[in-house]
DNA sequence: TTTTGCAGTTGACAACTGTAGACTCTCATG
DNA sequence: CATGAGAGTCTACAGTTGTCAACTGCAAAA
């Protein structure tokens, strides 16, 4: 809703973002390639395309050192909020509580989850 | 995750589903058209396409009376669960509680929401 | 019965996605 | 300095999505 452009991250691209989010520093493609090649079985070309598209979309920064280094321009939290809000507005007419309610009433949460959430709500006052 | 085929409902198609979900009975295209034409500004052709695609996908039943009547084959809850699970698995590595946590820690919930949720968690034991 | 409007079906077409090959240029290594 | 690996860029191509027009028949109105 807010950050329109940067947020149209597709499923495949998201995998790249997740990798970048979990690293401290910017990564050279080499490393991105290595990790995703193994975990996703993608060809190097595919990975290069995804990274490029993310750069074009403004979701990733390309920083010139010897070789380009890549780091996220939008944070995981930011994207998470956006994606969640998107779901909420598309499906629950903007009523976020309905999303939680649906989650609670489905089998999506373990007892442990519920406990932890209850805890969270206690503190969150 | 579960109902793979029927669940690949796109954003536009979802608008049709939402309309159908909020009706008791099956609707003839006439009515679907009227309502969406007004609320979405879509051409009749567009609406017909969306309905057809939903039928093809098995998300909507086409029932022959004088003219075809349409009704949802998957429920709003069912789809909601699927979409939520999808988000959770794509973004939060399957940890549903993280989604809720993100929601709670963002500004996505009003005080009222929080109250109601707290209530829900109390009962939900 | 003829006409006409609209439901239903097909086709269309551009943009976006998933996936990947090919080409070029540069840097490290021999 | 020459060479080769691989980073970066371009191109490609099929499938999906958002939008819609054109055609075809049926059923109601005239």
Image: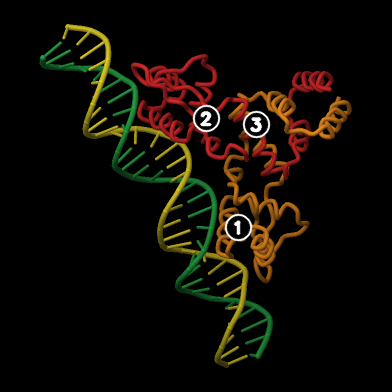
Chain colours: A red, B orange, C yellow, D green
Q: Residue B4, labelled with which disc?
A: none
Cα separation, mark 3 vs mark 2, equals 14 Å
- Residue at 67% in and 50% down: B73
Residue underneath mark 3: A81
3 and 1 marks on the same chain: no
- Residue at 59% in and 30% down: A79
The answer to whether residue B79 is left or right of residue A38 is: right
The answer to whether residue B90 is left or right of residue B79 is: left
Q: Between A60 and B99, which is closer to the camera in this rendering?
A: A60
Of tags 2 and 1, the one toward the viewer is 2
Q: Residues within 10 Å of mark 1 (few under 14, many from 20)?
A: many
Q: Residue A14, labelled with which disc?
A: 2
Location of residue D12 in the rendering, given as x and y in whole percent from the top left corner? 30, 43
Question: Relative to A90, is B125 above or below?
Answer: above
Question: Residue B35 is drawn in which quadrant?
Answer: bottom right
Q: Which quadrant: the C terminus of chain B? A: top right
Residue underneath mark 1: B51
Earlier sequence position, callout 3 versus callout 2: 2
Q: Residues within 10 Å of mark 3 (few under 14, many from 20)?
A: some
Question: Relative to B100, is B60 above or below?
Answer: below
Cα separation, mark 2 vs mark 1, equals 30 Å
């Amino acid at each position: 809703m807010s950050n329109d452009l940067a947020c149209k991250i597709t499923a495949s691209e998201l995998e790249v973002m997740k990798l970048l989010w979990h690293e401290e520093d910017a990564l050279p493609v080499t490393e991105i390639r290595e990790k995703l090649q193994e975990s996703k079985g993608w060809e190097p070309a595919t990975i290069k395309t995804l990274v490029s598209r993310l750069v074009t979309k403004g979701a990733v920064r390309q920083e010139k050192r010897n070789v380009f280094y890549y780091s996220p321009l939008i944070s995981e939290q930011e994207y998470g909020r956006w994606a969640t809000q998107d779901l909420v507005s598309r499906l629950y007419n903007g009523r976020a509580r309905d999303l939680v309610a649906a989650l609670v009433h489905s089998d999506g949460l373990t007892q442990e989850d519920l406990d932890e959430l209850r805890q969270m709500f206690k503190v969150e006052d």
